[in-house]
């Protein structure tokens, strides 16, 4: 952990200064505090360090500080420094989760040895979180963002590369393309996955309350503010904050948000106190922010600050070859959601779906799948009732083969292998039912 640090908390200034100097000579990066108030603002799920605290302090004592730290992240190592009469208390603290305790007086070498082991443990915890985040979610991302076109393969690759980091990210795409799905995937494969995911629709926040909603307020900050309130930024501490359609954020608020991005601090309305934030910001936009900057509607400095890691979510028109497969998946999801039996989608419906334009993208395609499952739409087909058993069996068989052809992109070998029939039998049935693999696949 190159950015590893020690937060040293002790109300005795002379001891605090001498201990910090000794640790710095041992090669550690040390920040000192006379009490635990500001320490809690620095602790988060990705905090790369160790806390060393005296037990006996005015205000927040070492035991209380440890308990509050464990509420933020139970795997942050806390080392307690005790006086001779506090050993029993320290043993109790060990049972409650302290990493270790050291009795005064202690040598710098002894403290440095304990800290070094605690640093190694914290490093392994953070590394393990990242590895689990990246390796454990691959199939999940495939399920959330299916598609064999190159643009989707590239998007999933970039999500995995960016997701495991703490980089703020801008997601650009048309309405309904799946920007929030991408944002949630980024959160879920990060080390912040177990912490809050706060979605804020910038276009829906009332103009007169937007600052209070985001930053919070103190009593009396404005008429009607009768009790203090956390804003959404503070609610997201340790996790991820999604700013949906950031292009709709009022121009004067953009400057305040830029400060939050740069300094990771906020001040509630009516307060001069600074609150530190440990959050990751993800913003989405359906408009070209560069054009908005040129038109004077979006701050250039905020755009360049957001534009470090950018993901472009393709529209369905940019990945037409994925439409049949995606539609079949949405039909399966709709059937499960509405408690219906899994249905076989007729090949002429699939062919029609593949050839249509979808200006509303995945959202519009999902609505079409829902209507089909609910029996509200026959996909443009004429109603035909197969009355005889042979006709019903033939219709079912035709649908199964057509669906398999779509699922495998028209490649015949995986189709006949998955269906347990020979290549010759597949050809015969395709000829019998008038199935042409070119009809059921489209070029990207």
Image: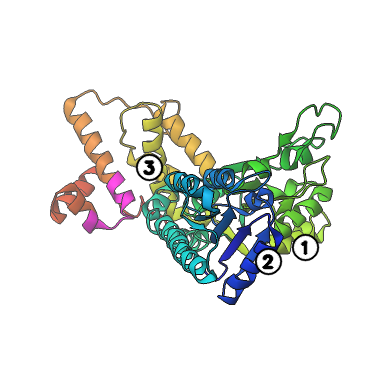
Which quadrant of the figure has residue 4? bottom right
In this rendering, is residue 5 above or below 362? Answer: below
Q: Which mark is residue 105?
A: none
Is residue 369 left or right of 436 when viewed as pictured?
right
**Element on which disc 1 rests:** helix
**Element on which disc 3 rests:** helix
Residue at left 78%, top 41%?
A: 211
Task: Point out the stretch of residues depicted in magenta.
Answer: 403-414
Residue at left 80%, top 61%?
A: 294
Provide the major secondary structure of the magenta segment.
helix
How far apart marks 2 and 3 lie (CA) works out to 66 Å
- For this orientation, the residue located farthest to the top is 387
Where does the image place residue 402, in percent across and percent down from the top left?
A: 29, 45
Q: Residues within 10 Å of mark 3 (few under 14, many from 20)?
A: many
In this rendering, is residue 338 above or below 183? Answer: above
**Element on which disc 2 rests:** helix
For label 2, the residue is: 17
Residue at left 40%, top 27%?
A: 338
Query: Is 363 contained in the magenta span?
Result: no
Is residue 407 left or right of 83 when viewed as pictured?
left
Where does the image place residue 31, in percent across and percent down from the top left?
A: 65, 63
**Dots 1 and 2: beta carbons under 8 Å?**
no
For label 1, the residue is: 301
Is residue 191 left or right of 268 when viewed as pictured?
left
For label 3, the residue is: 328
Where does the image place residue 271, in percent across and percent down from the top left?
A: 82, 42
């Amino acid at each position: 952990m190159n950015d590893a640090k020690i937060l040293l908390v002790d109300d005795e200034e002379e001891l605090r200064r001498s201990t910090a100097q000794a640790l710095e000579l041992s090669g550690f990066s040390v920040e000192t505090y006379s009490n635990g108030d500001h320490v809690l603002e620095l602790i988060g799920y990705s905090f790369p360090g160790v806390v060393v605290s005296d037990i006996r302090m005015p205000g927040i004592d070492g035991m209380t500080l440890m308990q509050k730290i464990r509420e933020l992240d139970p795997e942050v190592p806390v080392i307690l420094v005790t006086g001779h009469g506090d050993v029993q208390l320290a043993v109790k603290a060990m049972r409650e989760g302290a990493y270790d305790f050291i009795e005064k007086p202690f040598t710098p070498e002894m403290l440095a040895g304990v800290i070094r082991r605690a640093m190694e443990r914290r490093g392994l915890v953070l590394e393990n979180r990242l590895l689990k985040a990246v390796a454990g979610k691959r199939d999940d991302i495939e399920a959330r963002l299916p598609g064999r076109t190159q643009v989707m393969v590239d998007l999933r690759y970039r999500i995995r590369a960016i997701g495991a980091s703490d980089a703020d990210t801008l997601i650009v795409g048309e309405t309904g393309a799946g920007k929030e799905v991408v944002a949630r995937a980024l959160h879920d494969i990060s080390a912040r996955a177990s912490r809050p995911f706060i979605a804020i629709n910038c276009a829906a926040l009332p103009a007169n309350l937007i600052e209070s909603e985001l930053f919070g307020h103190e009593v009396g900050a404005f008429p009607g503010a009768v009790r203090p309130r956390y804003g959404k930024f503070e609610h997201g501490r340790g996790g991820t904050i999604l700013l949906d359609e950031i292009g709709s954020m009022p121009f004067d608020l953009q400057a305040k948000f830029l400060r939050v991005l740069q300094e990771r601090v906020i001040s509630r309305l009516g307060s001069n106190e600074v609150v530190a934030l440990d959050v990751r910001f993800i913003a989405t936009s359906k408009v070209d922010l560069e054009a908005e900057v040129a038109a004077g509607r979006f701050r250039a400095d905020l755009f360049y600050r957001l534009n470090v890691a950018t993901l472009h979510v393709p529209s369905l028109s940019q990945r037409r070859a994925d439409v049949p497969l995606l539609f079949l998946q949405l039909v399966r999801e709709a059937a499960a959601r509405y408690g219906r039996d899994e249905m076989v989608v007729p090949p002429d419906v699939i062919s029609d779906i593949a050839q249509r334009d979808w200006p509303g993208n995945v959202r519009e395609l999902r609505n079409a799948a829902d209507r089909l499952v609910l029996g509200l739409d026959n996909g443009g087909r004429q109603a035909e009732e197969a009355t005889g058993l042979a006709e019903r069996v033939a219709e079912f068989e035709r649908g199964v083969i057509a669906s398999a052809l779509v699922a495998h992109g028209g490649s015949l070998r995986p189709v006949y292998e998955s269906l347990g029939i020979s290549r010759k039998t597949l050809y015969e049935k395709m000829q019998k039912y008038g199935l042409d693999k070119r009809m059921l696949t489209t070029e990207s």
